[in-house]
Image (cartoon, helix red, strand yellow):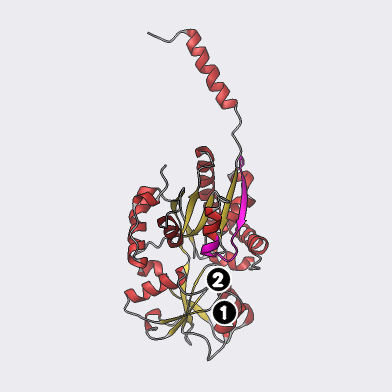
Amino acid sequence: MPPSLFTRLLAVMASLFFLASPLRAETIRISFPPDPNALPVFVLQAKGAQFLPHDTLEFRANPAGDPSAMRALIASGQVDYALFNLIGGTRINQGGMKNFCLVSPWVWRGVYLLTPLDPQGKPQPAFALGGKTIAVSPGISTPPHIVIQKALERGGVRADYIAAGAGTVLMQLLRTPGKAPAGVAAAEPMVSQILLRQEQEIWPVRWGIALDPTEALGGAVPLGALWRVGTSIPVAARERFEAALSKAAEWSTDPANRAEAAQIAAKGYAEFFRQPIPAQAFDDMLKNRRVQWRLDTPNAALPVVQTYQKNVFGINVQPALFCAQ
């Protein structure tokens, strides 16, 4: 029996009501360290009116990227999302943290091995570093260390690794003949800072990128990740934020927006992390696509995450690591 005119009228009125109802604005609290995860987050904040007009972002500081500090922020319920390395979040999840799950890997490239340039201006071969010393920024057991170590071991190379920090001591070490290591493993934006400063300061020792571990480890290295914390943010707001983050990353990598994105990143690092990094370093990083950002569906990401975590860190990952949709 066809619906009555009255029933149709009620349906139309209900539709108009929901269309006219304003979206509920949310404050989304985020924490992230000064590593490849950060740039699109700063862009999203600066371009909120364009990408996330209905909600507000609120940052929680973790300037050192310290795993224990990130764990404390998550456990105390001070954040709704955390962007940091995949292995760190996996260990927190497997340690029994409640209401903490993986949305998706987020940073798919961003760690490199640099070696001194030879007289022809080419980086010395990465797979000739057997038995030599590689400095790691910021330190031992961080993703730059483990990822580069595994990539070299795939080629039969075993080197010695030392912690080198991420500041003045590292820069002085790299520029000093006779003291410089045979290589340095680092993540962006440190890699771009090294490449820029050696040009500006005319270092006696010059460096170039000798190895992208993405290629050595099978073409997929999910370094950083987007983690969801708690359940206080409604589904609609979560969907808005996650879509907006992807759009901010796409905007940042568009050559037409690169210079502005670099300026936004430099401002964000200086103000939020108290780390002055020239916009020129971020511009070069974006120009050469040394970082790649992408959110995948759980079905697409799961086999990649399982293979990477097992081969690089010896960890078995179950599908329950991912957030239920």
Residue 235 drawn at (x, y percent): 50, 39
The x, y position of residue 231, in whole percent, is 50, 43
174 part of magenta stretch: no
Which element is circle 2 on?
A: helix
Residue lying furthest bottom = 178
Q: Are marks 1 and 2 in contact (CB under 8 Å)?
A: yes
Q: Is residue 316 visible?
A: yes
Quarter of the N terminus within the rendering: top left
Q: Which residue is the site of mark 1?
A: 170
| Quarter location, residue 125 | bottom left
Quick one: SS at disc 1?
helix
Q: Is residue 66 left or right of residue 182?
A: right
Disc 2 target residue: 190
* Magenta stretch in the rendered image: 53-69
Q: Residue at x 48, y 53 (%)?
A: 226
Which amino acid, mark 1?
Answer: Leu
Q: Nearer the viewer, residue 80 or 244?
A: 80
Give the position of the C terminus as an image quadrant.
top left
Query: 306 and 267: which one is in front?
Result: 306
Residue 255 seen in render:
no
Q: Quadrant of residue 279?
A: bottom right
Q: Earlier in the sequence, mark 1 or mark 2?
A: 1
* Disc number for residue 4: none
Q: Residues within 10 Å of mark 1 (few under 14, many from 20)?
A: some
Which amino acid, mark 2?
Answer: Met
The residue lying toward the viewer, choosing from 62 and 192, is 62
Q: Viewer-nearest of labels 1 and 2?
A: 1
Q: Position of residue 18 (x, y in %)?
A: 55, 25
In this rendering, position of residue 113 left or right of residue 316: right
The correct choice, above or below, for 85 with respect to 6 in the image is: below
> Which residue lies at the image location 33% right of the left edge and 55% below the top edge?
303
Give the distance between the C-alpha atoms of the residues marked 1 and 2, in whole angstroms.
10 Å
